Amino acid sequence: MKTRITQLLGIRHPIIQGGMAWVAEYHLAAAVSNAGGLGIIGAASAPPEVVRTQIQEVKKLTDRPFGVNVMLMNPNAPEVAQVVVEEGVPVVTTGAGNPGKFIAMWKEAGVKVIPVVASVAMAKMMERAGADAVVAEGMESGGHIGELSTMALVPQVADAVRIPVIAAGGIADARGFAAALMLGADAVQMGTRFVTARESIVHANYKERIVKAKDIDSEVTGRSTGHPIRVLRNQMSRDYLKMEKAGASFEELETLTLGSLRKAVMDGDVKGGSLMAGQIAGLVKQENTCEEIVEEIINGAKELLNRHFE
């Protein structure tokens, strides 16, 4: 299937893996790229040399395009941005801030720049700054979220900018993929579905919680701090929300969640860990390989959107 995104990025299928902290490492990124999508390494708060190693390891496993997600609130972001250039990374996605000060450097190096946005205003700002595309991410997503739903956000962003739009939030199967295209997107980005991929290093306990999740099993913490995060309900999220309601300070809440994502991903702590996952978790019923996930979505979409494949 050809879209503006497949042509822009040189990939077979318009499916992009989310740059999830601790989850999106080189095994998963390489597997998604080898399946015809775009695998992403999540730099998160990792030191620059760790990110460099991840990039070099991906190159050993795939000769297809891949990307790095740069979290702009990371104090190491300027160094990570430079590593991206030095290592010849084809694509960068960005989150948690404005990448404007890095775009010229990346573009000069031939890097395709794709910021994640949660509003029309931010999408237009990124287009003016020189972004090649944007990810319009709805509040159904796992992890850090905005206020608008994917159904509302994607068509408004698609109408507002000329660059390609990638839809994210609440997408895990062929129906969501097809719906995103009808909303005006040129591709989709998925996170939760790839957390459970066989190639994902995520602890089996975490994967099991997603596979067994119901439609109402996610909730949002951190609204009082201005940094809302969607997670699956557990003891940690209940404690957090109780503290929020009682008026706990930002520092107290940060202490509660310190290292909680690593606990969930690496240690399998599903009680005290942060189980970031989207509202679509209830649709994920089993662990599949990245190739199976991509093929299922593309083949299912062909049946739903025959006219796009004639």
Image (tube, helix red, strand yellow):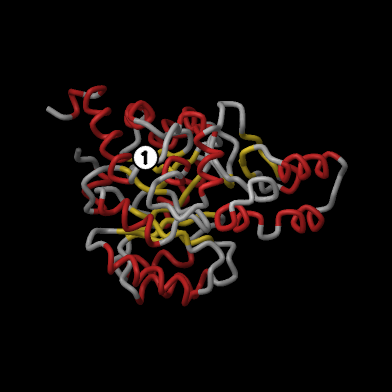
Residue furthest out toward the left: 310
Residue 72: % across, % down:
54, 62
Q: Is residue 148 above or below residue 88?
A: above
Residue 258: % across, % down:
70, 59
- Residue positioned 28% across, 69% down in the render: 60
Screen quadrant of the N terminus: top left
- Residue positioned 48% across, 63% down in the render: 43
For badge 1, the amino acid type reads Val
- Asked which secondary structure carries label 1, the reply is strand
- Residue positioned 43% across, 40% down in the render: 193
User: Looking at the image, which is closer to me, 307 or 15?
Assistant: 15
User: Looking at the image, which is closer to me, 300 or 212?
Assistant: 212
- Residue positioned 56% across, 58% down in the render: 266
Q: Residues within 10 Å of mark 1 (few under 14, many from 20)?
A: many
Q: Is residue 116 above or below residue 294?
A: below
User: Looking at the image, which is closer to me, 294 or 155?
Assistant: 294
Q: Is residue 19 above or below residue 301?
A: below
Residue furthest out toward the right: 246
The tally of labels here is: 1
- Image check: 22 left or right of 86? right
Residue 129: % across, % down:
42, 57
Quarter occupied by residue 41: bottom left
Residue 283: % across, % down:
46, 29
Residue that numbered label 1 is attached to = 188
Screen quadrant of the C terminus: top left
